[in-house]
Amino acid sequence: MDLLATIKDIAEKAGVTKSTVSRFLNGGSISLETAQKIEKVIKEENYIPSPFARSLKAKLSSIIGVIVPRVDSAATAQTLIGIEEITETLNYTSIVNNARQDNQREIQAIEGFARNKVAGIILVATEITPEHIKTIKNCPVPVVIVGQEHPEIYSVIHDDYQAGFELVENLAELGYHELTYVGVSKRDNAVGVVRKEGIFSGAKVHQFERMEQLEGDFSTQKALKIGMELFKDETHPLVIAATDNLAVALMKAAQQCGRKIPEEVAIAGFGGYEIGQFMNPTLTTVEYQFKEAGRVSMKVLEKLIHNIPCEMKTMIPTHVKLGDSTKKARN
């Protein structure tokens, strides 16, 4: 039953307002007589308040606030699964807020969760601004960020630099010595800056003869458009995309332009998304353990909730998985 509708029913039967019932559930101040009336109706109706209301009334929250930048993302979905696995084990309940890739909405969500006295907050971040830092520092409950890092904030990240470096290292061993990188904005520090640095550092160490960078965003449509231009007039022996989704869009563009993969152009990405393994040819990628990142973030948060010391930064390893999209380098 919907919580608001239930509160309305209880209010009507107890002869009080909905706000009075809400105050009772939230542990607010009401008269003993009124509290007894509400309690009586609750027992008669066998009403079970939400975990949020129960925890607030008990003055001990079992709610974890989770803020995500978007919900239509494989990385976000896997991270949430990992968080849920641990919250259930530890008898917490998570409430997810979709910030829709809006920094201000993320700030407001942190402040809103804090006002509602959640036990802790997990922010799956794409960017950490000075306002984020200020809000998190002033937050009365512990906060853990996933996907980005800051020296003053508890962070769970993948080693994006090493991921980029090792991918190029593996490709160099296959004989590639030129690359074009289709990246994303620097706003996303992990993907737009650190991952790119790893790629180009690896290319320099392995003495790549040509390195080119094209900046896109996380839009597959934009990646498709870039690919159609990229493969129209000249052959690029190796194209690395910032994510698997972008790599899949580039594969489609290459095929539409009549470029054979991997004979004429090799393509690789990052993420280890399932879609890459259903492509023909299968996509070379760096596997990211998003589910594990979710699990670890909740474990770190649990320690912070109970004032147990832990490391400011936890690193989740990645793994290069070679597919058929980079099977053979051109000489």
Image (cartoon, helix red, strand yellow):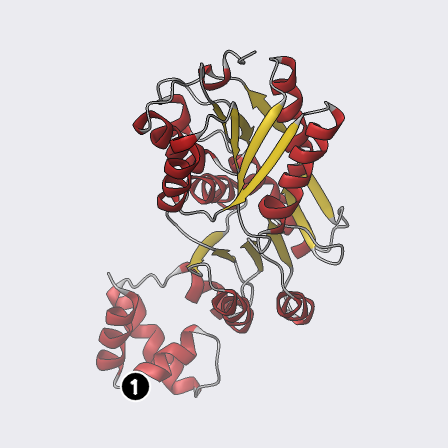
Q: How many marks?
A: 1
Label 1: state its secondary structure: loop
Up the image or down, 133 lies above or below 299; here it is below
The structure residue drawn at horizontal position 39% and vertical position 81%, both measured from the top left corner, is 35
Residue 184: percent from the left, percent from the top?
53, 47
Residue 257: percent from the left, percent from the top?
33, 28
The structure residue drawn at horizontal position 28% and vertical position 71%, both measured from the top left corner, is 4
Q: Nearer the viewer, residue 240 or 218?
A: 240
The structure residue drawn at horizontal position 65% and vertical position 14%, both measured from the top left corner, is 173
Q: Nearer the viewer, residue 186 or 124?
A: 186
Up the image or down, 27 lies above or below 227; here it is below
What residue sits right under mark 1 in the picture? 17
Q: Nearer the viewer, residue 8 or 82?
A: 82
Q: Quadrant of the C terminus?
A: top right
Q: Is residue 298 visible?
A: no
Residue 211: percent from the left, percent from the top?
63, 33
Q: What amino acid does circle 1 point to? A: Thr
Q: Nearer the viewer, residue 182 or 167?
A: 182
Q: Quadrant of the N terminus?
A: bottom left
The structure residue drawn at horizontal position 59% and vertical position 36%, both measured from the top left corner, is 212
Up the image or down, 223 lies above or below 150; here it is above
Residue 117: percent from the left, percent from the top?
54, 69
Q: Is residue 144 visible?
A: yes
Up the image or down, 24 lies above or below 262; here it is below
Q: Is residue 311 left or right of residue 32?
A: right
Q: Is residue 261 left or right of residue 320?
A: left
How packed mark 1 is, by other alpha carbons closer than 10 Å (few <14, some 14-19, many 20 or more), is some
